[in-house]
Amino acid sequence: MKKIFRIKDNDEFQHVFKHGKSFANRQLVIYYIKKSEQQHFRIGISVGKKIGNAVMRNRIKRCLRQAFHELDKNVLPTYDIVIIARQPTRKMNFHEIKKSLIHLLSRERLIKK
């Protein structure tokens, strides 16, 4: 995923948290906000230290980025999306994480059918 499609700045994260909508399942929490001036969606990924060591956290972030990369054409383009991983993602493989992400995105209608 290219860097222009990522949310990196803390102010942008806070804007999505305060003004956006949220939805969660057992594995992931999603916050999103519509930005009509954008041409492509942007994602921010947060994995807390309670999840595990740096290796574990980075593995989860790589899985989430790869899932978004594979869903690139199906995600609606005008949204900023922040994903927060929860404890159960430690024991999940890539396909389970992707399935959980698809569940959240389709539930909130952020993905094309």
Image (tube, rainbow, N blue to C red):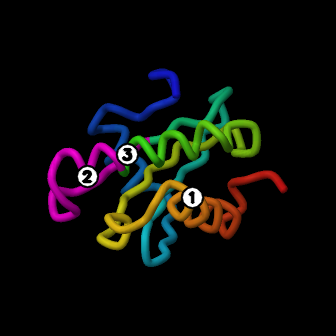
Q: Earlier in the sequence, mark 2 or mark 1?
A: 2
Q: Which mark is residue 61?
A: 3
Q: Earlier in the sequence, mark 1 or mark 3?
A: 3
**Residue at the far bottom in the pictured view:** 26
| Residue numbers of the magenta segment | 44-59
Up the image or down, 103 lies above or below 70; here it is below
Q: Is residue 111 left or right of residue 7?
A: right
Along the viewing direction, whichever of 18 and 49 lies nearer the viewer: 49
Separation of residues labelled 2 and 1 (CA atoms) = 16 Å
Residue 40 position within the rendered picture, expressed as x and y whole percent measured from the top left: 64, 30
Separation of residues labelled 1 and 3 (CA atoms) = 14 Å
* Residue wearing tag 1: 95
Disc 3 crowd rating (10 Å Cα; few below 14, some 14-19, many 20+) is some
Question: Dot 1 lies on which element?
Answer: helix
Residue in view at x 37 percent, y 58 percent: 84
Asked if disc 1 and disc 3 are in contact, CB closer than 8 Å, the reply is no
Identity of the amino acid at label 3?
Lys
Residue 57 magenta-highlighted: yes
Residue in view at x 54 percent, y 50 percent: 33
Residue 86 magenta-highlighted: no
* Among the 4 quarters of the image, the one containing residue 47: bottom left
Question: Dot 3 lies on which element?
Answer: helix
Q: Which mark is residue 56?
A: 2
Residue in view at x 60 percent, y 43 percent: 79
Identity of the amino acid at label 2?
Met
Of circles 3 and 2, the one toward us is 2
Asked if disc 3 and disc 2 are in contact, CB closer than 8 Å, the reply is no
Question: Dot 2 lies on which element?
Answer: helix
